[in-house]
């Protein structure tokens, strides 16, 4: 594997024993948290559910006074918070099985359905299995670019890539629909790599789920507000857009800012548990912020901890983050984190610069580009699988 950057003393070397030692430390950390799960975790998730339902009721109710601009804005804000909590801190985390230990039917990962157009079972396959198992492996993890974006230099460039920022903006605004189409693998359908029966099955489920969502948000609730139909419709559309932009931004900050690494199938063949942990740490990034910010992000602001332990209750991630960071420092691995502005700026900078042909950055014309778009060396880490050692360039 190619080393992107090196230290003054050359690449850092982690032996197989060190990697397995790191893996055991993380296994022990997980075991301690699992052993401590109990009433406070139960109270936490139910408090979030109570808050989510309260915001939804408030938002729906305030829409009946939507003819008053300040009230309409308050209604949209409340409904937006409700949808964000439902998708991020409740839906995403419950469907990861984080609360299966409670044995509560409403929090069962296999039965839960969320307030978005994507069928839960399709999301569990494309996200829980494909993404979390094959994190950042080219050819396996379709979250690398979501099938439409060039988000990594290893992805081939062509003229269609010039629209990268436009595609990214459209995906951000319609994110729930992009997530719905994700498991369909549209590019493989176009190439004839998916069977007709399989495509029909997926489309039928998507049509059924999306139909219910559209009917609820864009027909029934607006109709219930009578003469305020258009006002309520506009409010519901706006709340969904707010949720889409927020979810997109948080997720992209956790996966695509500078320093996040990608891998090939060859490099990850016969991967050990310890090496799987290292790949999760190198392929993820955190966002620093307040406790409220972490709650509103579904604690995906702790994306490193989430990728290490996707089935642990997300409210535990802030608690274990310092220990994970210490382990990174102990073994010379980066702990990629930063404020929201820095991380999202890094993501959009990457989206824009990767829209341009690679040859451009080897020409003098590149000097005329804004500094944010120049192909400067990206600080980061890449693991080199070898028989006797794993080399890491930092």
Image: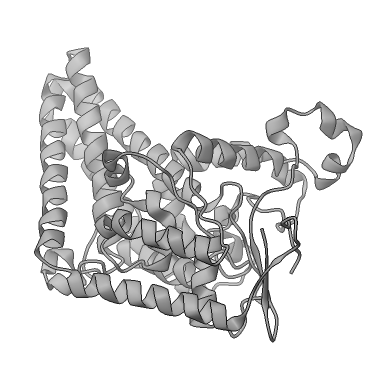
Residue 244 % position (x, y): 39, 41
Left/right of residue 161 with respect to residue 307 in the rendered view? right
Observer-nearest of 76 and 100:
100
Which coloring applies here? one colour
Please state the horizontal and vertical placement of residue 35, each as a whole percent of the image. Answer: 20, 75
Quarter in which the C terminus is drawn: bottom right
Residue drawn at 90 percent across, 38 percent down? 363
Count of numbered tags: 0
Q: Residue at x 86, y 45 (%)?
A: 359
Give the image quarter of residue 207. bottom left
Whether residue 256 sits left or right of residue 389 in the image: it is: left
Horizontal side of residue 377 vs 245, given as left or right = right
Q: Nearer the viewer, residue 202 or 287?
A: 287
Residue 78: image quadrant is top left
Asked whether the viewer can see residue 218, the reply is no
Using the image, determine if residue 128 lies above or below residue 148: below
Residue 108 position in % (x across, y down): 19, 69
């Amino acid at each position: 594997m190619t080393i992107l950057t090196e230290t003054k003393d050359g690449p850092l070397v982690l032996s197989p024993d060190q990697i397995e030692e790191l893996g055991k430390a993380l296994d022990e950390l997980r075991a301690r948290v699992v052993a401590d799960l109990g009433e406070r975790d139960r109270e936490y998730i139910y408090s979030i559910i109570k808050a989510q339902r309260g915001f939804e009721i408030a938002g729906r109710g305030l829409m009946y006074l939507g003819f008053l601009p300040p009230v309409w804005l308050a209604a949209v804000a409340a409904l937006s918070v409700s949808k964000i909590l439902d998708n991020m801190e409740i839906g995403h985390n419950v469907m990861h099985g984080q609360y299966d230990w409670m044995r509560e039917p409403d929090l069962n990962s296999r039965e839960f359905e969320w307030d978005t157009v994507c069928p839960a079972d399709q999301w569990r396959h494309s996200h829980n299995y494909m993404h979390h198992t094959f994190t950042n492996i080219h050819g396996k993890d379709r979250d690398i670019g979501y099938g439409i974006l060039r988000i990594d230099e290893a992805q081939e460039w062509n003229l269609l890539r010039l629209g990268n920022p436009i595609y990214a903006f459209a995906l951000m605004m319609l994110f729930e629909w992009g997530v719905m189409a994700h498991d369909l693998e549209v590019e493989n359908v176009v190439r004839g790599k998916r069977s007709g029966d399989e495509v029909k099955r997926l489309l039928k489920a998507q049509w059924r789920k999306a139909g219910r969502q559209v009917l609820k948000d864009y027909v029934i609730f607006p109709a219930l507000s009578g003469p305020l139909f258009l006002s309520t419709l506009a409010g519901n559309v706006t709340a969904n857009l707010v949720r889409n932009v927020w979810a997109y931004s948080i997720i992209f900050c956790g996966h695509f800012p500078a320093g996040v690494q990608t891998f090939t199938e060859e490099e990850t063949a016969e991967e050990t548990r310890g090496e799987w942990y290292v790949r999760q740490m190198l392929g993820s990034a955190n966002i620093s912020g307040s406790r409220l910010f972490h709650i509103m992000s579904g604690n995906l602001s702790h994306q490193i901890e989430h990728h290490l332990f996707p089935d642990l209750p997300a409210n535990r991630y802030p608690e274990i983050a310092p220990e994970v960071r210490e382990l990174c420092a102990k073994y010379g691995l980066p702990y990629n984190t930063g404020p929201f502005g820095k991380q999202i700026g890094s993501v959009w900078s990457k989206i824009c610069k990767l829209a341009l042909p690679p040859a451009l950055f080897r020409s003098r014309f590149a000097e005329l580009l804004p500094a944010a778009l120049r192909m400067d060396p990206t600080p980061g880490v890449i693991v080199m699988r070898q028989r006797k050692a794993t080399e890491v360039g930092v």
